[in-house]
């Protein structure tokens, strides 16, 4: 597969961001830690979505349960697109750029950003569960997107494309699954899984 050089799109903006990273060494370690390990925080937010849905109706609980599936579908779409486009990582296309994160393998392509897709998809999915939680996740997803460019892992258009994937895929996947599974979830809440899915009395 031929590889695509994304530097022609916004390579100059990428250089500006990484030049900023060069002059903020005090922030490099924190940014690298955040961009790598924040995925765990988004998983926790999904669990919070399930937990706070327990006292509420079947619709909200179903949305909380299908949220991880919507995220997984968005991430899968990103991986398919990424391998079809085959865009080289900036560390391989932009000479002399300051790169914080270790350059991945040549076949680990850049567009869309997988980390950003995951984060943004969690945010979108949580909007169907609890808007306040969705807003918190959205702000953190923006921070994740910025950090992916700051550490030199992606071009700006990579993270924008990732957000587009999340915004398109999750609002299709999550509501569809919710409609299909709401009755099943409702029965489970009043049956053997009551303790996990509800705080209401049975019956």
Image: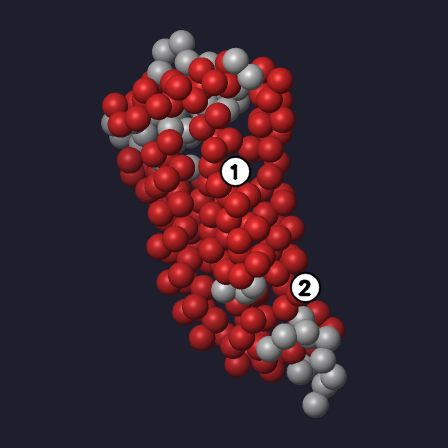
Q: Residues within 10 Å of mark 2 (few under 14, many from 20)?
A: some
Residue 14 makes an appearance in the image: yes
Going by the image, does 119 lie left or right of 56?
left
Going by the image, does 9 lie left or right of 200?
left
Residue for badge 2: 51
Going by the image, does 201 lie left or right of 76?
right
Q: Residue at x 34, y 34 (%)?
A: 157
Disc 2 and disc 1 in contact, CB within 8 angstroms: no
Q: Residue at x 59, y 47 (%)?
A: 42
On the image, the x and y values in percent for residue 18 come to 45, 19
Q: CA distance from mark 2 to mark 1?
A: 25 Å
Residue for badge 1: 143
On the image, the x and y values in percent for residue 130 come to 56, 63
Instruction: For mark 2, give the secondary structure.
Output: helix
Q: Earlier in the sequence, mark 2 or mark 1?
A: 2
Q: Residues within 10 Å of mark 1 (few under 14, many from 20)?
A: some
The one nearer the camera, 159 or 62, is 159
């Amino acid at each position: 597969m031929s590889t695509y050089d994304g530097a022609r799109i916004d390579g100059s903006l990428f250089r500006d961001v990484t030049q900023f990273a060069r002059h903020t060494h005090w922030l490099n370690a924190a940014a690298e830690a955040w961009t790598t390990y924040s995925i765990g925080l988004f998983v926790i937010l999904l669990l919070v979505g399930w937990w706070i849905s327990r006292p509420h109706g079947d619709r909200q609980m179903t949305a909380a349960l299908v949220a991880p599936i919507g995220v997984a579908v968005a991430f899968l779409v990103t991986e398919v697109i990424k391998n079809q486009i085959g865009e080289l990582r900036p560390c391989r296309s932009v000479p002399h750029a300051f790169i914080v994160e270790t350059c991945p393998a040549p076949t680990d392509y850049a567009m869309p950003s997988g980390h950003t897709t995951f984060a943004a998809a969690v945010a979108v999915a949580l909007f169907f569960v609890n808007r306040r939680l969705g807003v918190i996740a959205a702000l953190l997803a923006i921070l994740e997107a910025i950090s992916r460019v700051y550490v030199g892992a992606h071009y700006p258009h990579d993270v924008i494309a990732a957000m587009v994937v999340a915004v398109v895929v999750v609002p299709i996947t999550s509501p569809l699954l919710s409609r299909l599974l709401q009755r099943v979830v409702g029965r489970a809440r009043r049956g053997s899984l009551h303790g996990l899915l509800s705080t209401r009395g049975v019956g």
